[in-house]
Image (spheres, rainbow, N blue to C red):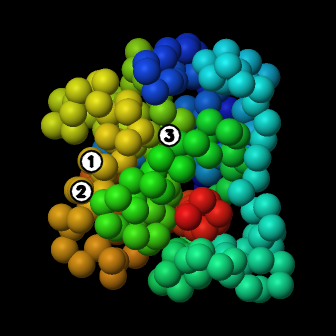
Amino acid sequence: MKPDFTRWLPAIAKNRNTALSIAGVAALGGLAFGPAAVAAPVTSGPHAGAVAAIDLATGKSRQAVTVESGLTTGSATGTATGKVPAGKPDKDQLMPHGVEGAQSRIPLDDTQLANAKAIVETAKKTGVGSRGAVIGVATSLQESKLYNLGHLGAYNDHDSQGLFQQRPSSGWGTPGQITDPDYASRAFFEALKNVHGWQDLPLTTAAQTVQFSAFPWAYAQWEEQAADVVQQLW
């Protein structure tokens, strides 16, 4: 039985790419900091304190945006008519192994979608394609709920930061680098490309081989939403 975590992170911090240490960007117990992931799906939106923190950090009005616009609710890919939009990857490309276990889903705001877009664009540049993009987005959903988190002080797992909760002490880069969405995404995908046969691995296995999580099955719960995100943003 998975607990319902409702504790929220207490501070705001920014760098040039708006790395956030936010009161409420995601439930503390549901975040995976660096190699120690915690599997706890978050199915409700942030509380009022989180909304205010995000507004202050981004300078934007926070509006919940669902990535299923034009898609069948609860479906990983495809339009209401079952047709994949021109130029978009299809279900077989995005989820060649289907999904493993129960799926989690959270509403995404403009900041989260912008970070997802950075991951998708870097997936294209590094040559990992739409499947790699799904792995990247799902990993970030688990690790940071697609928020570019700065240092969280006492709430940090060691020195984990950024979209993928990478650790400078583990060689991922400087704090400034790993809180740059483009750099962090490239570092993740270059590591993924070094995983032999990653294209043929289930998502959670591929992600875990890069992240070394204490909860390796945590990534699997985000595959369906990640596929929705990638299909819309591709």
The answer to whether 83 is drawn above or below residue 217 in the figure is below
Give the side of residue 11 with respect to residue 42, left or right: left
Q: Which residue is mark 1?
A: 187
Query: Can you give x and y, in whole percent of width and height, for residue 146 in the image?
Result: 54, 43
Res. 164 in view: yes
- Which disc is residue 190 wearing? 2
The answer to the question of whether label 2 and label 1 lie on touching residues, with beta carbons closer than 8 A, is yes
Res. 33 in view: no
The answer to whether 196 is drawn above or below residue 117 in the figure is below
Which amino acid lies under the numbered mark 1 shown in the image of this protein?
Ala
Image point (73%, 18%), residue name? 52
Distance from Cα at disc 3 to Cα at disc 1? 16 Å
Q: Which residue is mark 3?
A: 144
Neighbours of disc 2 within 10 Å: few (<14), some (14-19), many (20+): some
Image point (77%, 70%), residue name? 71
Which quarter shows the N terminus?
bottom right
